[in-house]
Amino acid sequence: MANESGRAGRGSDQFPLRLPPGMRDQIKRAAEDSGRSMNSEILDVLRDAFPEEPSLEDLVDALDYSIAMIRDIQANSPSGDVARSNKFMTILGRMEATNSDLWKTVRDNRQSPVVVLRSDVLDGMAALQAEFDLPSVVIDSLTSDLIQMSLDRIASGEERLKVWIGEGDARRMVEIERPSRAKSAGEE
């Protein structure tokens, strides 16, 4: 258990340990060289050897990110070879199936943090990034903020939900009406 300073205290798990001759002196020298206690030195070495295992949520997030990157590679493949590769599609399919299984396991009403953007949207964001000389982190945040602003406007009734259907010249916008809510027995 950690105390207020974040370090393990007297209430922590303790384990008596026998060291081979000379090792205590080695640990003491290493601790002095790094300006730490012997205990901190030993814990640092043990943490390197036994890193904390990632949570299931961390694994899902990492897999979501990997799928998004693979989809980006697929969308931006200049020759289209990647998108036609059976091996590529098999790997992507396996990752998506694994991701789906992990989401079922997590079952905590989380939403996937990954949104796959159309190529025209990605091009527009890249143009903004170049025009304003913005780092990728800012563009990622901007994209999320723009999506959130649109969701807020739709939720408040300020804007209708619009969906674009089709491609090229056949592309058209359809507004989706808000479902009317049936009045409950007590309402007039």
Image (cartoon, rainbow, N blue to C red):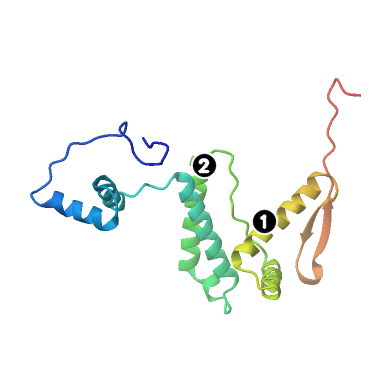
User: Residue at the location (66% across, 73% down)?
Assistant: 133
Query: Is 44 in front, or is 128?
Result: 44
Q: Which mark is residue 64?
A: none
The residue singled out by tag 2 in the image is: 104
Q: Residue at x 58, y 43 (%)?
A: 110
Outermost residue to the left: 21
Residue drawn at (57%, 67%) of the image: 72
User: Of helix, strand and loop, which one carries label 2?
Assistant: helix
Q: Which quadrant holds residue 15? A: top left
Residue sitting farthest toward the top: 186
Q: Which amino acid, mark 1?
A: Ser
Camera-nearest residue between 112 and 10 = 10
| Left or right for 37, reference 25 | right
Amino acid on which the number 2 mark rests in the picture: Lys
Q: Nearer the viewer, residue 1 or 80?
A: 1
Instruction: Mark 1 and mark 2 in contact? Answer it, CB < 8 Å.
Output: no
Q: Residues within 10 Å of mark 2 (few under 14, many from 20)?
A: few
Where residue 101 appears, as percent x and y from the top left, is 49, 46
Query: Residue 144 at what x, y percent from top left?
Result: 67, 56
x, y percent for residue 29: 19, 55
* Distance between the alpha carbons at the discs numbered 1 and 2: 25 Å
Q: Of the numbered discs in the image, which one, if any, rests on residue 144?
A: 1
